[in-house]
Image (tube, rainbow, N blue to C red):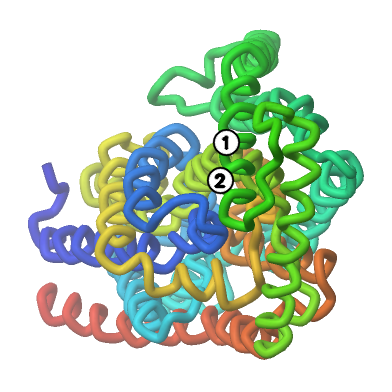
Amino acid sequence: MIYDDTWLWIVILGFIAAFVLAFGLGANDVANSFGTSVGAKVITVRQACILGTIFEMAGAILVGAKVSNTIRKGIISPEMFTNGTEDTFLAGNLSALTGSCIWLIVATFMKLPVSGTHSIVGATLGFSMVINGFKGIGWTKLAMIGASWFVSPLMSGLVSIGLFKLIDIMVLTKEKPLEPGLRLLPLFYAFTLAVNLFSVFYKGSELLHFNEIPFYGTMILTFGGAFLTAILVRIFVVPRQRKKINIMCKQLLEEEGMLPEKKDDIKELTDRADDALLEIKKNLSEKDEKKGMGDADDDRPEVAGLFKFLQVLTAIFGSFAHGGNDVSNAIGPLVALWITATTGSSAQKAPVPIWVLVYGGVGISIGLWVWGRRVMKTMGEDLTKITPSSGFCIEVGSALTVLVASNIGIPISTTHCKVGSVVCVGRVRSKGSVDWKLFRNIILAWVVTLPVSGGLSALSMYGFCAILNATTS
């Protein structure tokens, strides 16, 4: 099956390095998908791992092939490695996997939320420059990727701010936010599902034949599914949520000793719940001031109950987007290595094998379970205070940005999108609620990622080239 038996050691090491890289992505980037949900106490770490395992795999298979093509063919030109230099191309992709996986494991150990995209792009450039200097680098594609590193946090932040302000005006600032929130709940679900369905079916996976669906078919599936979801949510979810939230309010009032005589009076119950929450807010504000987080407020109980239920879907949405965008970082060089090793050509004409996408998804899932919680606390709790309503806006805004970029084929960083949304929404919610010192440290980690991974890849390339020269001489 391998075109040249002397390449077997490169293929074996490549699969090992790719799995370690996928493990590091799962351990580090899991904070992007579920850090805000865990930080807002919407789901537990165990629940995050279960959901992540399912939807990281789904995103990897359904969306991941597009970005994989950019990683393996768009940054450098594979045509530069023809006419007997295919072994050098194989060693280069192994170097890219090695350099990026070392840096991700080190960063995760240090609890630094770094960009897997930065790491693999820098590592790919590192090995290419060892062999060809600046020749063969796709500068246009690289410029688009570089611009996205700066644009994506801002764009994601603005989308999240816009959504948060809309919810703030239509729900959060209302005297009785429960009923307005319940009226908008079907719309929230429909919008979230519509974006997700469109990203799956529009120019979707060739292996699953989604690319054969015409545009009108994509629109029917997208908006038909969203409309059906809105109806089901209105009929089944809204009444259940109304009952569940008012039971929660009763329990809160009992704890505060403020339970009204007419326990089934929803309006009076909601009024008294707001009064009870004001006392809780005063206590929380005093604690927050001691921590330097002076005016960070919690959601009211009815709002928290509403968005806790909704944020489960947004966490899944974010996990799906992460799987689609970031699994390609782990398997992009592996796909290039595998196709070259089995065809004997570095031209990269073959499609991405689905089993390789599954392989990367499994690595990410195992990393999530084993080491995921290390970085999760940084994103979900330390950077800013996150509530269910703000967490929903952060996750939808950042996931929407990532999914749009995935369909365009630009491998932007989910880390940058999520951090941008967290910081922007945190700043809008409360001027003093963002830990700017931690944010500065995260920015510094971003800056050093590309050169460090590129340097490690270049050093690996020198070593692998020495081995190749020794085996062929």
Count neighbours of disc 2 (C-alpha within 10 A) and say few if under 14, some if 14 to 19, many if 20 or more.
Answer: some
Residue 200 lies left or right of residue 260; in this view the side is left
Mark 2 secondary-structure assignment: helix
* Residue drawn at x 31%, y 36% as measured from the top left: 353
* Residue drawn at x 72%, y 56% as measured from the top left: 276
Quarter placement of the C terminus = bottom left
Residue 216 lies left or right of residue 308; in this view the side is right
* Residue drawn at x 63%, y 52% as measured from the top left: 388
- The answer to whether mark 2 and mark 1 are in CB contact below 8 A is yes
Above/below status of 191 relative to 221: below
| Residue 87 visible somewhere in the drawing | no
Task: Check residue 81 in the rendering and tell me which mark sits there, or answer none.
Answer: none
Q: Nearer the viewer, residue 298 or 167?
A: 298
* Residue drawn at x 57%, y 65% as measured from the top left: 415
Disc 2 marks a residue whose amino acid type is Gln
**Which residue bears the numbered disc 2?**
251
Residue 81 image point, x, y percent: 40, 60
Q: Nearer the viewer, residue 221 or 4?
A: 221
Above/below status of 328 relative to 349: below
Disc 1 marks a residue whose amino acid type is Ile
Q: Nearer the viewer, residue 377 or 296?
A: 296
Above/below status of 360 relative to 87: above
Corner quadrant of residue 307: top right
Residue 361 image point, x, y percent: 32, 47
Q: CA distance from mark 2 to mark 1?
A: 6 Å
**Which residue bears the numbered disc 1?**
247
Residue 393 image point, x, y percent: 71, 50
